[in-house]
Amino acid sequence: MTPQTLREADLTAACAGLRVRGALQPGADDGAPQGTGTLLLLGPDEPGFWPLFSFSPEYLDGRPDPLDRWSKRIVSALAGDWGGSALFPSDGPPYAPFLGWALASGRAWSSPVGMLVHDAAGLFISYRAAITLPGRLALPAPATKPCDSCPQPCQTACPVGALTPGQAYDVARCKTHIASEAGRTCRTAGCLVRRACPVAKDFSRRPEQSAFHMHAFHGDAAP
Protein backbone atom coordinates (compact mmCIF):
# COMPACT_ATOMS: atom_id res chain seq x y z
CA MET A 1 0.00 0.00 0.00
CA THR A 2 1.31 3.44 -0.91
CA PRO A 3 2.35 5.39 2.22
CA GLN A 4 0.22 8.44 2.87
CA THR A 5 2.79 10.29 4.98
CA LEU A 6 6.55 10.50 5.23
CA ARG A 7 6.39 9.08 8.75
CA GLU A 8 4.45 6.06 7.51
CA ALA A 9 7.08 5.45 4.84
CA ASP A 10 9.87 5.81 7.39
CA LEU A 11 8.31 3.36 9.86
CA THR A 12 7.64 0.81 7.14
CA ALA A 13 11.21 1.11 5.85
CA ALA A 14 12.50 0.63 9.41
CA CYS A 15 10.91 -2.81 9.50
CA ALA A 16 13.23 -3.73 6.63
CA GLY A 17 16.38 -2.26 8.25
CA LEU A 18 16.26 1.09 6.45
CA ARG A 19 15.09 4.64 7.15
CA VAL A 20 14.01 7.56 5.01
CA ARG A 21 17.09 9.80 5.13
CA GLY A 22 15.66 12.49 2.89
CA ALA A 23 12.78 13.27 0.56
CA LEU A 24 12.01 15.77 -2.17
CA GLN A 25 9.40 16.65 -4.73
CA PRO A 26 11.67 16.76 -7.79
CA GLY A 27 11.36 19.33 -10.52
CA ALA A 28 11.93 18.91 -14.23
CA ASP A 29 15.71 19.43 -13.90
CA ASP A 30 16.33 17.11 -10.91
CA GLY A 31 16.94 13.97 -12.93
CA ALA A 32 14.08 11.95 -11.45
CA PRO A 33 11.96 9.72 -13.67
CA GLN A 34 9.04 11.43 -15.32
CA GLY A 35 5.89 11.29 -13.22
CA THR A 36 7.69 11.27 -9.86
CA GLY A 37 5.68 13.14 -7.24
CA THR A 38 7.91 12.32 -4.27
CA LEU A 39 11.37 10.78 -4.18
CA LEU A 40 12.46 9.04 -0.96
CA LEU A 41 16.14 8.44 -0.15
CA LEU A 42 16.76 5.33 1.95
CA GLY A 43 19.75 4.62 4.17
CA PRO A 44 20.64 2.06 6.85
CA ASP A 45 18.82 2.12 10.18
CA GLU A 46 21.74 2.16 12.60
CA PRO A 47 22.76 0.45 14.84
CA GLY A 48 20.36 -2.39 14.04
CA PHE A 49 21.21 -2.58 10.35
CA TRP A 50 24.38 -4.65 10.58
CA PRO A 51 22.98 -7.61 12.58
CA LEU A 52 20.10 -7.80 10.09
CA PHE A 53 22.29 -7.59 6.99
CA SER A 54 25.04 -9.90 8.29
CA PHE A 55 22.53 -12.76 8.61
CA SER A 56 21.09 -12.21 5.15
CA PRO A 57 21.56 -14.76 2.35
CA GLU A 58 23.44 -12.14 0.32
CA TYR A 59 26.06 -11.65 3.04
CA LEU A 60 26.43 -15.37 3.73
CA ASP A 61 26.59 -16.75 0.18
CA GLY A 62 30.18 -15.56 -0.50
CA ARG A 63 29.31 -13.95 -3.82
CA PRO A 64 30.43 -10.41 -4.81
CA ASP A 65 28.57 -7.22 -3.91
CA PRO A 66 26.43 -8.58 -1.08
CA LEU A 67 25.23 -5.15 0.10
CA ASP A 68 24.15 -4.05 -3.36
CA ARG A 69 22.32 -7.32 -3.89
CA TRP A 70 20.62 -7.08 -0.47
CA SER A 71 19.59 -3.49 -1.21
CA LYS A 72 18.05 -4.43 -4.54
CA ARG A 73 16.06 -7.27 -3.05
CA ILE A 74 14.77 -5.32 -0.06
CA VAL A 75 14.11 -1.98 -1.74
CA SER A 76 12.56 -3.49 -4.86
CA ALA A 77 10.07 -5.28 -2.61
CA LEU A 78 9.29 -2.04 -0.75
CA ALA A 79 8.83 -0.14 -4.00
CA GLY A 80 6.47 -2.81 -5.29
CA ASP A 81 4.40 -2.68 -2.11
CA TRP A 82 4.23 1.12 -2.34
CA GLY A 83 3.31 1.29 -6.01
CA GLY A 84 6.57 3.04 -6.83
CA SER A 85 9.87 2.26 -8.51
CA ALA A 86 13.33 1.66 -7.05
CA LEU A 87 16.54 3.40 -8.12
CA PHE A 88 20.06 2.43 -7.03
CA PRO A 89 23.39 4.32 -6.96
CA SER A 90 25.15 1.36 -8.59
CA ASP A 91 22.88 1.30 -11.66
CA GLY A 92 24.47 2.94 -14.67
CA PRO A 93 25.85 4.55 -16.60
CA PRO A 94 24.07 6.85 -16.67
CA TYR A 95 24.00 7.02 -12.89
CA ALA A 96 21.14 8.57 -10.96
CA PRO A 97 22.09 11.92 -9.33
CA PHE A 98 21.95 10.77 -5.72
CA LEU A 99 24.29 13.54 -4.58
CA GLY A 100 22.03 16.20 -6.05
CA TRP A 101 18.95 14.57 -4.55
CA ALA A 102 20.60 14.43 -1.13
CA LEU A 103 21.44 18.14 -1.24
CA ALA A 104 17.94 18.98 -2.48
CA SER A 105 16.34 17.04 0.37
CA GLY A 106 17.26 19.71 2.91
CA ARG A 107 18.81 17.11 5.22
CA ALA A 108 22.34 16.83 3.76
CA TRP A 109 25.06 19.35 2.94
CA SER A 110 28.66 19.52 1.81
CA SER A 111 30.82 19.23 4.94
CA PRO A 112 34.00 21.23 5.66
CA VAL A 113 36.03 18.32 4.23
CA GLY A 114 33.86 17.88 1.15
CA MET A 115 31.93 14.68 1.83
CA LEU A 116 28.23 14.85 2.66
CA VAL A 117 27.09 15.50 6.22
CA HIS A 118 23.56 14.60 7.30
CA ASP A 119 21.41 16.06 10.06
CA ALA A 120 20.96 12.65 11.74
CA ALA A 121 23.78 10.46 10.38
CA GLY A 122 26.57 13.02 10.29
CA LEU A 123 29.48 11.95 8.09
CA PHE A 124 28.28 8.33 8.18
CA ILE A 125 25.42 9.05 5.82
CA SER A 126 24.96 6.58 2.99
CA TYR A 127 22.11 6.07 0.57
CA ARG A 128 21.30 2.51 -0.41
CA ALA A 129 18.49 3.41 -2.81
CA ALA A 130 15.67 5.75 -3.70
CA ILE A 131 12.00 5.04 -4.23
CA THR A 132 9.87 7.20 -6.50
CA LEU A 133 6.18 7.63 -5.71
CA PRO A 134 3.57 9.14 -8.01
CA GLY A 135 1.88 11.12 -5.23
CA ARG A 136 3.19 14.22 -3.48
CA LEU A 137 3.70 13.57 0.24
CA ALA A 138 3.86 16.51 2.63
CA LEU A 139 7.50 17.27 3.45
CA PRO A 140 8.99 18.95 6.53
CA ALA A 141 10.91 22.21 6.49
CA PRO A 142 14.65 21.87 5.74
CA ALA A 143 16.81 20.89 8.71
CA THR A 144 19.60 23.01 10.18
CA LYS A 145 23.10 22.23 8.96
CA PRO A 146 24.94 20.75 11.96
CA CYS A 147 28.30 22.22 10.89
CA ASP A 148 27.05 25.76 11.59
CA SER A 149 27.25 25.18 15.35
CA CYS A 150 30.08 22.65 15.38
CA PRO A 151 33.80 23.03 16.23
CA GLN A 152 34.39 20.92 13.08
CA PRO A 153 36.93 18.37 14.34
CA CYS A 154 36.66 16.65 10.95
CA GLN A 155 39.02 19.25 9.50
CA THR A 156 42.07 17.87 11.31
CA ALA A 157 41.04 14.25 11.98
CA CYS A 158 42.75 12.59 9.01
CA PRO A 159 46.26 11.53 10.13
CA VAL A 160 47.68 11.80 6.60
CA GLY A 161 45.75 14.83 5.33
CA ALA A 162 43.78 12.92 2.70
CA LEU A 163 40.60 14.77 3.69
CA THR A 164 41.22 18.42 4.44
CA PRO A 165 39.29 21.65 3.77
CA GLY A 166 39.75 23.25 0.39
CA GLN A 167 41.49 20.26 -1.20
CA ALA A 168 40.24 17.36 -3.30
CA TYR A 169 40.01 14.01 -1.56
CA ASP A 170 43.38 12.27 -1.99
CA VAL A 171 42.13 8.73 -2.57
CA ALA A 172 45.58 7.26 -3.22
CA ARG A 173 47.00 8.65 0.01
CA CYS A 174 43.98 7.36 1.93
CA LYS A 175 44.28 3.84 0.52
CA THR A 176 48.02 3.71 1.19
CA HIS A 177 47.44 4.72 4.79
CA ILE A 178 44.65 2.27 5.58
CA ALA A 179 46.71 -0.59 4.10
CA SER A 180 49.57 0.20 6.48
CA GLU A 181 50.05 -0.78 10.11
CA ALA A 182 49.61 2.87 11.06
CA GLY A 183 46.19 2.81 9.42
CA ARG A 184 44.91 -0.25 11.25
CA THR A 185 42.42 1.78 13.31
CA CYS A 186 40.90 3.30 10.17
CA ARG A 187 40.83 -0.12 8.53
CA THR A 188 39.18 -2.01 11.39
CA ALA A 189 36.97 0.63 13.02
CA GLY A 190 36.24 3.11 10.24
CA CYS A 191 37.46 6.44 8.89
CA LEU A 192 38.71 8.75 11.64
CA VAL A 193 37.24 11.76 9.85
CA ARG A 194 33.75 10.26 9.80
CA ARG A 195 34.10 9.15 13.42
CA ALA A 196 35.19 12.64 14.51
CA CYS A 197 31.84 14.16 13.51
CA PRO A 198 29.85 14.97 16.68
CA VAL A 199 26.60 14.08 14.91
CA ALA A 200 28.00 10.67 13.99
CA LYS A 201 28.65 9.93 17.68
CA ASP A 202 24.88 9.56 18.06
CA PHE A 203 24.69 7.35 14.97
CA SER A 204 26.55 4.26 16.07
CA ARG A 205 27.99 1.85 13.53
CA ARG A 206 29.51 -1.45 14.61
CA PRO A 207 33.27 -1.84 14.06
CA GLU A 208 32.72 -4.95 11.93
CA GLN A 209 30.41 -2.94 9.69
CA SER A 210 33.03 -0.23 9.24
CA ALA A 211 35.66 -2.90 8.53
CA PHE A 212 33.38 -4.38 5.86
CA HIS A 213 33.07 -1.01 4.12
CA MET A 214 36.78 -0.24 4.38
CA HIS A 215 37.67 -3.64 2.93
CA ALA A 216 35.27 -3.01 0.04
CA PHE A 217 36.77 0.44 -0.49
CA HIS A 218 40.37 -0.76 -0.57
CA GLY A 219 39.74 -4.11 -2.19
CA ASP A 220 42.70 -6.07 -0.83
CA ALA A 221 43.30 -4.57 2.61
CA ALA A 222 42.37 -7.24 5.12
CA PRO A 223 40.96 -6.08 8.48
Image (cartoon, grey):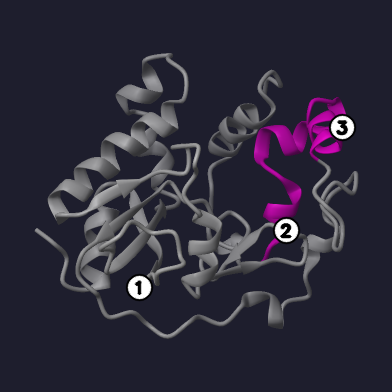
Tell me the amino acid under the disc marked 3: Ala
Name the foreground residue: 36 vs 39.
36
Callout count: 3
Q: Residue shown at 54%/62% (left/top)?
A: 100
Res. 157 image quadrant? bottom right
Main secondary structure type of the part rendered in magenta: helix
Res. 201 image quadrant? bottom right
Is disc 3 surrounded by few (<14), some (14 to 19) or many (20+) residues within 10 Å? few
Q: Which residue is mark 2?
A: 196
Q: Name the N-terminal-most of marks 1 and 3.
A: 1
The residues bearing labels 1 and 3 have C-alpha atoms spaced at a distance of 45 Å
Question: Of the numbered discs in the image, which one, if any, rests on residue 203?
Answer: none
Tell me the amino acid under the disc marked 1: Gln
The residues bearing labels 2 and 3 have C-alpha atoms spaced at a distance of 18 Å
Q: Do the CB atoms of the residues marked 1 and 3 lie less than 8 Å apart?
A: no
User: Is 75 displayed left or right of 144 in the figure?
Assistant: left
Q: Name the N-terminal-most of marks 2 and 3.
A: 3
Question: Of the numbered discs in the image, which one, if any, rests on residue 182?
Answer: 3
Name the foreground residue: 160 vs 109.
109
In the rendered image, residue 136 lying in the magenta stretch gets the answer: no
Q: Which residue is mark 1?
A: 25
Q: Which residues are magenta?
A: 171-198
Name the foreground residue: 6 vs 133.
133
In the rendered image, residue 181 lying in the magenta stretch gets the answer: yes
Q: Residue shown at 71%/33% (left/top)?
A: 187
Q: Residue shown at 25%/63% (left/top)?
A: 35
